[in-house]
Amino acid sequence: MDAWLLYDFRGSNSIAWKILNMPQHSHCTRRWAIVIPRSGSPKKIVHAIEQHTLSHLAWDEIVYSERSTWSDALRAALDGCSTVAMEYSPDCSIPVVSKVDAGTIELIRGLDKTVVSSADIAQHFQAVWSELQFTDNLTTATLLREAMMDAFDFLRQKCMKKAYVTEFDVQQNIVRFYQEHGLQSDSEPIVAIAKNASSPHYCPTPEINSPITIGDTVLIDMWAKSEMLGSTYADITWMAHCGTTVPERDALLFGIIRDARDAALSIVRERFSSGIKLYGYEVDDAARAVITNAGFGEYFIHRTGHNIGEETHGAGANMDNYETHDTREILRGTSFSIEPGIYIPNDIGLRTELDVVIDSAGNVLVPSEPTQDAIVALLA
């Protein structure tokens, strides 16, 4: 690419705002743009009544006012550039990076420019962790696994006493653990008995929840980060059974998703060990093939995983060739989940999830290890 064109209208391009560290109070009612050339200094384009918009960026400025001068400004800033990267995805195959409207893409093409997606280059700025974030995340992942074991122990004690307990009770026990250990989350964890878990994003509330009784299989999905500024999330899912022996069908289905998870992790390790590039859709393919070959492909109804950063769902490559076709390269210095599942409507839902962290040297880490190999029988 000859240049990267960051364009925004009234906050439409969250990627541009994040990368340029736009002050959240910025009053932006007119179009603005930044042109970052392959060589030379960037140029900013601002409207005459909002020259303050990009004042925190000390680059050459082009001011426009009329619609014709907007086109003239873009033409001048892109002079000498043939291929221009923008927040655009062909056929919207990666919706999370499609931030520029079709009309603006048409305008740039009308200036005799070839527009390509900025998807890969943008994640270098948005998804790659600092060393401090790596160190902090290792602590968070360890604490999160402790939170899971604490939740299992809480549920075990209730079952042993044959005490009344609900999904919401277990959820709130996890929330208390977060508070006591300096963890925070953008939302409360998922605790779901098998039938409820057949809806992947079911989450109990004070008004909507089910009692957990002896014989129930329970899914617990939790995610959290520390209170450090810039901290990153850890995100895991485990399953338990409130009994002495896990039902044969539950064990069988869990074994399938476990093998799918491990197949996905295996291709990640193989590629980074060999130095061969790996793309998000390939990880999804590896996991999905296992579930499909076992005859349950129609019940795996979401992508295999998502990028993780300062937000639970980060800005980097997702492990997805199902909901989208994610062709972004998985980068060193990033993290993502692997979380295959089987969801049979109104019957049962199962999921297993771990986080993968690729350090700056290309080492593949699973901070929450050991991973779950079988459903835990709480009363065994």
Image (tube, rainbow, N blue to C red):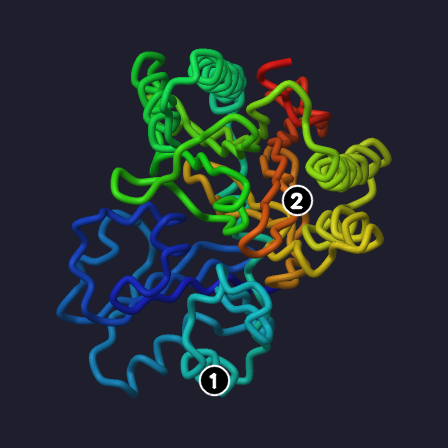
Q: Quadrant of the N terminus?
A: bottom right
For residue 295, the mark is: none
**Which residue is more in the foreground, 185 or 227?**
185
**Which residue is more in the foreground, 353 or 315?**
353
Instruction: Describe the element under mark 1 as helix, strand or loop.
Output: helix
Q: Is residue 214 left or right of residue 48?
A: right
* Quarter where residue 307 is shown: top right
Q: Is residue 93 above or below residue 172?
A: below
- Give the x, y percent position of residue 178: 35, 20
Task: Look at label 1 and name its amino acid.
Answer: Glu
Q: Is residue 26 left or right of residue 377?
A: left
Q: Which residue is mark 1?
A: 106
Q: Quadrant of the C terminus?
A: top right
- Give the x, y percent position of residue 310: 42, 36
* Quarter where residue 301 is shown: bottom right
The residue most toward the left is 49
Q: Is residue 172 above or below residue 284?
A: above
1 and 2 marks in contact (CB < 8 Å): no
- Give the x, y percent position of residue 233: 46, 31
Q: Is residue 142 left or right of residue 177?
A: right
Front tag of 1 and 2: 2
- Give the x, y percent position of residue 240: 58, 26
Task: Look at label 2 and name its amino acid.
Answer: Pro
Instruction: Describe the element under mark 2 as helix, strand or loop.
Output: loop
Q: Residue at x 36, y 13 (%)?
A: 181
**How many residues crowd around disc 2 within 10 Å: few (fewer than 14), some, or many (20 or more)?**
many
Q: Is residue 282 above or below residue 76?
A: above
In the rendered structure, which disc, 1 or 2, sits on the residue that comes first in sequence? 1
Q: Residue at x 33, y 22 (%)?
A: 227
Q: Residue at x 65, y 31 (%)?
A: 358
Q: Which residue is mark 2?
A: 340
Q: Is residue 307 above or below residue 14?
A: above
